Image (cartoon, helix red, strand yellow):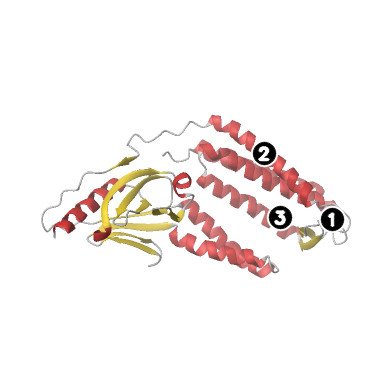
Amino acid sequence: MNRATPRLRALAALPFVLALAVHLLLFARWRDELPAELATHFSAGGEADGWTGPTAYVLVSTALLLGLAAGWTALVRRRYLWAAWATAGFAGGLLVQLLRANRVDDPFVTVGFSPGMDLGIALVVAVAAGAAGWALSSLVPAEVEPSVPGEADPSVLPLAAGEAAGWSKDTGSRALTVLSVLALAAAPVTLLVATWPGALLGLLGLVVGVPGLALARVRVTVDRHGLTVRSALVPRPRVRVPLDGVEGASVREIDAVADFGGWGYRVRAHRTGVVLRSGEALVVRRGSGREFAVTVPDARTAAALLNALVERHGKV
């Protein structure tokens, strides 16, 4: 599967840049009408119960939009461009509604925020933005399907008697790295400034960021021990499939979302995998009937060597 083109990445980042520009322009225009402390959290009835200073508000809202832009720019595919625009429309619309709600004399007494109406307006903006993104996807060339078959059993790599061989390659996901670093960076800030239960977001950042960063780059090794996939940063986590547990290896084109529901260590019916991107993957058929897949460049060489080692192991 093709990587996202520069044009596609630019179109994915564009709605977030526009949302940020509109938000900052309105903030500057309404600055004299805004209170010293902006209401930024509301109860179900629309009453303000949390406030933030203007500087902190601008920094947090800007970081939010830029973080979303970074994530979508890294992960976007042509068929999901509409979703990037819809996300930017919803986030930008909600931030604008939040500013509008604060244009009163005393936000500690009453704030003009209606959860149902304002969320509804943000959803309308999201739908309109998503439609614009869908229309703009026509400007991006369609992704070319790989010329190799969807699945192939590579020939066994020839090995001389007694010859030792090994294969190892590092592979990673820039998108997962960026998202994990952002989660870890936001965690201490949220834990320090947020009140309960808002501090739960900080704990969530740690829960998501630590394993995410550990799996953002892995080392895949095929040798006399079998297949090993471990974090390139720390000794754990690690997945090992010994030779006597391998029935065979093949190469397959994998769509991270369609086949495994996302990125990272994934578990699905009858298969597991370490999925850091869409594209070429080494797929191992295990004796239990389950499959293990890992997305890695040059998977064909790894599969051929693993098949040769399994064949040799079976003759011993």
Residue located at (66% from left, 38% from top): 129
- Check contact, mark 2 vs mark 1: CB within 8 A: no
Residue located at (81% from left, 57% from top): 45
**Horizontal side, residue 187 vs residue 314: left or right:** right
Instruction: From the image, tell me which residue sits under label 3.
Output: 58
Q: Is residue 33 visible?
A: yes
Quarter of the view holding residue 221: bottom left
Secondary element at image label 1: loop
Neighbor class of circle 1 (other Cα within 10 Å; few <14, some 14-19, many 20+) is many
- The outermost residue toward the left is 161
Secondary element at image label 3: helix
Of the pair 127 and 55, the residue shown nearer to us: 127
Q: Is residue 24 visible?
A: no
Work out how far the residue at label 3 is from the one at label 1, CA to CA, in angstroms: 19 Å
Instruction: Tell me residue 60's x, y (percent).
Output: 67, 57
**Which amino acid type is marked by label 3?**
Val
Work out how far the residue at label 2 is from the one at label 1, CA to CA, in angstroms: 26 Å
Q: Earlier in the sequence, mark 2 or mark 1?
A: 1
Neighbor class of circle 2 (other Cα within 10 Å; few <14, some 14-19, many 20+) is some
Neighbor class of circle 3 (other Cα within 10 Å; few <14, some 14-19, many 20+) is some
Vertical arrangement, residue 42 with respect to residue 128, above or below: below
State the quadrant of the C terminus. Answer: bottom left
Q: Earlier in the sequence, mark 2 or mark 3?
A: 3
Instruction: From the image, tell me which residue sits under label 2.
Output: 127
Work out how far the residue at label 2 is from the one at label 3, CA to CA, in angstroms: 25 Å
Label drawn at residue 111: 1
